[in-house]
Amino acid sequence: MQATILLATFALEPRRYKAIYYSLQGKQTISNLFASHEYGLLDQFHLYPKLKWNDYQAALSQLEKEKLVIIDQTRAEAKLTSAGLVRQTGLLAQGFWPTAYRYWQMGPAEEQWERLLLAVQVVSNYQHQIVHYQPLTEHLLIQRQVKAWLKKIGTAGGQNFVLELGLALAQLPEQAALIIANSFWSDYDAGIPGPTLAQALSLTPAELQLAQFNSLGLLLSLIRRETLRYPILQQLLPMPQTPLNRSADWTYHQVLTGKSWSAIVTDSRLKEGTLREHLLQAALLCPDFSIEAPAVQQLLKADPESFFSQRVQEIITARSSRTGGEQTQ
């Protein structure tokens, strides 16, 4: 990976570099989720699912060699130097870091991006009667999903897809629309090669990919806000109904029904500690987490000093502070 991209994940205060690696890779343990929350990286969780540990270590070593970070091997921590902070500020000013992308609300960025590009290729090729071609992605599941989507919407749907996409791009910020539109490729219209587009935007290819994800995040936010206007795009780019996995979602659903904690424990075959972890995930990932639910209140009052109680209160306090700050701006 491009070493300097990692600068966006560090700060002047020491951070556990393994936790950042696991966050970028998408390892869902409660400790990793809390680290991602603490470092402000929850939205970029799973940003590099194929990232190898050796590659990550090599990138960190390069940053240390360039005196952009200081690594404490004993504590397994790293922090920015003053030069690293300057470099980080300059990089982020280029606007490539995907701040508009919300992994838990939008799904894996790479898969959504490949789904969009493949759909454009397929529809364009069909409209120009190009039958034999190499799909843009080798991801078989995405190929099947796009094929099923195209079959469902039919020929007229393909034409409406083009109209919806054009309308959506017209509503996006100019830079985001430019990045998405110029990333499309088909066998009829090859578009602009990635390296050429990156150079035009004064980005490296690695930074361009992140800028594409950021632009995609803006597109998905638009689609989610205006559901009636973009039905075909919604079918192509489905977003998770919940940020929780099936087991955690079951536990949180039981909480929302108003059940007591003891009843939830009785109805579940899982350990009580696992059920608490499910609620911690819900507190972290669900913006409207119900702290007033009877089961949650029962746990908080039973042991206010417990790990569970302390973490839930920290999450709610941080969320309230952030929401209050946004409202006053």
Image (cartoon, rainbow, N blue to C red):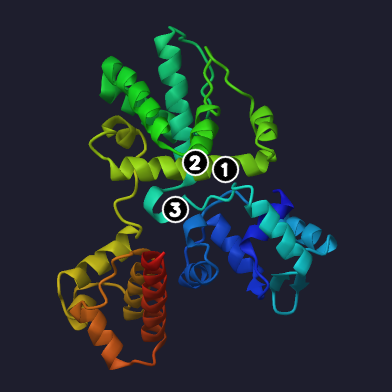
- Residue furthest to the front: 329
- Residue at 32% from the left image edge and 73% from the top image edge: 279
Q: Which residue matches tag 3?
A: 103
The answer to whether one can see residue 136 in this image is yes
Label 2 with label 1: CB-CB less than 8 Å: yes
Q: Name which of mark 1 and mark 3 comes first in the sequence.
A: 3
Residue closest to the eye, 92 or 1: 92
Q: Secondary structure under badge 2?
A: helix
Q: Amino acid at mark 1?
A: Ala
Question: Comparing marks 3 and 2, which lies closer to the viewer?
Answer: 2
Q: Residue at x 84, y 61 (%)?
A: 65
Camera sees residue 53: no
* Residue drawn 69% across the image and 54% down it: 90
Please tell me the numbered disc located at residue 215: 2
Instruction: Count every numbered label the image shows and give the total.
Output: 3
Q: Quadrant of residue 260?
A: bottom left
The quarter in which the C terminus is drawn is bottom left
The mark lying in front, picked from 1 and 3, is 1
In the image: residue 328, left or right of residue 109: left
Q: Amino acid at mark 2?
A: Ser
Q: Which mark is residue 211?
A: 1
